[in-house]
Image: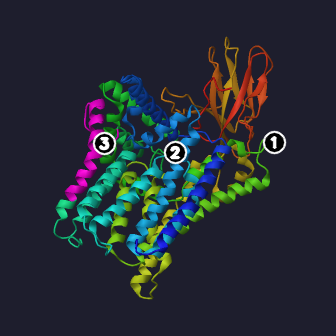
Amino acid sequence: MAADPRIPRDLLVIGLVSFLLRLGAWAVAIWGRLPALYDELGYLSRARGWAELAVRLVESGVWDAGSWQAAYGQGHWPPLHSLLLAPMVAFGEDFLPAARLVTVVVSTATTLLVFWLGALIGGRNVARCAAALHAFYPTFIGFSHLLWAETLSAFLLVGLACATFKADGATGEGNPSPLKWSFLAGSVGGLGALAKANALIFVPVVVLWLCRPASTDRRRPWVRAAAVMLGCGLWVVPWLGVLHHEEGRWMPMSTLGGYNLALGNHPWVPPGYGSSWGDELSKSKMQSRLEEVASRTDSDWRTVAGLLALEEMRQQPGTTARRSVERIRMLWTADVFVARHVLHGAYVELYPTTSDGTYPTALQWAVVLLVAVLALSFWILLTCIGIGIFLGPQSAERTLLVLLAIAGSLAPALTLGFPRLHMPLLVILLPLAGRSLERPRWKSDWASKAKVLAVLGWVLFSVSGAGRLGLYLNPSSLHSPAARVLEPWVGPTLVSDQILLRRKETSRSWQIRLENRQAAFLVIPVSTSGVPEPKALQPEVSWDPGEGWKRLEVVARAGASIRIVIESPSGDPMTFDPVRPGTGSWTDLDAESGSAFRWLGGGPGVLAPTPTDD
């Protein structure tokens, strides 16, 4: 690769373009005051724990148990992503912009690695096509400032593939040190498992591929395999030891394996669904059952979850198979996370204030267009990848990339599948899309026609999951007019908004209700770990004495009124609309009682400000 003098120039140009695009998205997020959402809260909490633990060790040499427990986070996730974010805590309480910038840099570096991977398997033109796809793909740009671990996982997975190809010497270049590259491949694979627990499966795939009979280096395949395992073990084994020390038993990379298995395999998974992802009521039923059994048997509920899931799978093999197909369909359909952030109103400062609390019509349809572009870009890219797999040049490199994508799909097929999880797998397949764009091979024989049908079938299978995606988007009532217009095509649509209420007078009980019975409240208490715990829908909510703060989500059919009425014993009822776009600040309701409300955006899981945040 280094022999081509044009490659450094290509790397510089594509890397700069990738960085500028991601930096622009990051600037929009910071300007829009995008809060931490969903799992981002957990990663930031752990990052803060790691930072505090390090500071105490350096300053006083004391191992602080509280900081360690925050960093460990019950072992739910491996530590690498939180460790990467931890140094950003030095920027002070508002370290979220710096943390988001870390993922921007990692995503840009992934573009460069994709270029290298494309060059290894197809030369300069394939490298440019693959890297350009990564740089310009809208979802990768929109996701690059979000704090999920998929961005880091994609970077490490591409690095694993590059090191594996170098270890095998399949590039045709001189390769004097396959053992060093094998050890590096194992190390990168181990780091990948420390970023995402299910990434550990990529390491045995690499080992088996390096030991295949057609391997370029037939002299020492098992020695290279040992080097891969050694490199992986140096990173993975210490974390496994930590898990064993904390939990008292051996477990693979995470304490949530059994729980994730249960989410996709329990009696209350809604008909037609692959798991309880996106259905809080069935998840609550499952959680209640787990806690009840754990209490009765004096067991850890996470252990109980795995046992109950295995029992469900054993008793319902047909249902398990059907759910697995649905989970794969949801894994390989268009991403909803970037679109959901926009529809939730999470970028709060980007929303103009209007008299009726909705988006202007032009912006309503701009958002609809954005969601359509995100979805269509995925299916176009999936088509290019399918052409590269079925109609592109056949090679050992193509086989490894496909095997890695298949291996990465196994855990979601058994547990829960949703589009965010496909992102690292999509990145690893970009060189195949680049290869198809460079030189697609079309033939008129029956074998080629069958391959074309395979491509179309795969894409249509993915498109068929689009109807269910609407169930997970949950737009804010900001978008109610557009959602109502689109209902003939997308079906009945719910809108939702989260609000935070406060009051100073807390001696008596107040009642909170909705004027329109087409809407309902979803009460969202927050656990000690900061994770929202949604409960059942109800039309009225009591604001109990002594409770100065109340956090609610209001769910309604698109177009329905969601005006809220608060009835207090000390005054006239207070009526208000929860949506106040463009400010994110407090709106007073009653000066005497000191009551006010704050709109937090749409959809479940939005971070509520702490009670001291005025």
What segment is highlighted magenta in the picture? 225-254
Marker disc for residue 356: 1
**First along the sequence among labels 2 and 3:** 2
Which residue is at a point 41% across and 32% down the rendered structure image?
71
Dominant SS type (magenta): helix
Q: CA distance from mark 3 to mark 1?
A: 52 Å
Please indicate whether residue 596 sits to the left or right of residue 529 in the image.
Answer: right
Quadrant for the N terminus, please.
bottom left
Front-most of residues 144 and 504: 144
- Residue 147's mark? 2
The quadrant of the image that shows the C terminus is: top right
Residue 228 point in image, percent of width and height = 25, 56
> Taking 77 as reference, is 296 above or below it?
above
Which element is circle 2 on?
A: loop
Contact (Cβ within 8 Å) of mark 3 with mark 1: no
- Mark 2 and mark 1: span between their CA atoms? 33 Å
* Image spot of residue 600 (x, y percent): 66, 36
- Could you tell me the amino acid type at mark 3? Glu
- Identity of the amino acid at label 2? Leu
Say which element carries label 3. helix
Residue under the image location 79 percent in, 50 percent down: 360
Is residue 456 something that shows in the picture?
no
